[in-house]
Amino acid sequence: MKCLSSEQQRNTGAAVITFILEANLTGFNASDQFTVQYVNNVLKTAALKTAANPEGNQGLAFNVKLGKQSAVHKLNCELEEENKLVCVKDKISTITFTR
């Protein structure tokens, strides 16, 4: 299953990055487990005026290229309870979603 997020923005302090997430969900099984792999697709960046960049110069403010980024993130997820989804991100951190 392929999914696209709506446009999102992140303020880094030096720039505002507009991006979408492109995700693939795979490996669904009878144990309520599945995998999500996602990548950020940067649509645009806008430099902010800062002390280090008083003109708001785009080239000086931020070094993010437009388009799909090289880092692919992986979540290994399991539905532990009807209202509780637990995912391990990049084998490092655990994220719990509840409703």
Image: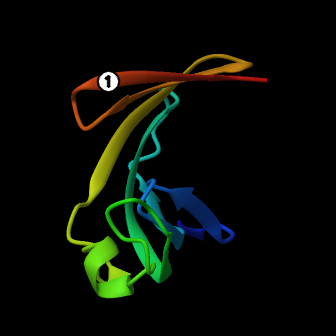
- From this viewpoint, is residue 66 visible? no
**Residue 43 x %, y %:** 50, 84
- Secondary structure of the residue carrying tag 1 is strand
- From this viewpoint, is residue 28 visible? yes
Residue at x 44% of width, y 62% of height: 50
Residue at x 31% of width, y 47% of height: 74
Of 83 and 68, the residue lying toward us? 68
**Residue 82 x %, y %:** 73, 18
**Residue 94 x %, y %:** 39, 21
Quadrant in the rendering for residue 3: bottom right
Q: Which residue is mark 1?
A: 93
Instruction: Work out whether 46 lies above or below 86.
Output: below
For the C terminus, the image quarter is: top right
Judged left or right of residue 54, residue 60 is left
Of 10 and 3, the residue lying toward us? 10
Looking at the rendered structure, the kind of residue marked 1 is Ser
Residue furthest top as drawn: 81
Judged left or right of residue 97, residue 51 is left
Residue at x 30% of width, y 51% of height: 73
Of 65 and 52, the residue lying toward us? 52
Within 10 angstroms of label 1, few (less than 14), some, or many (20 or more) residues? few
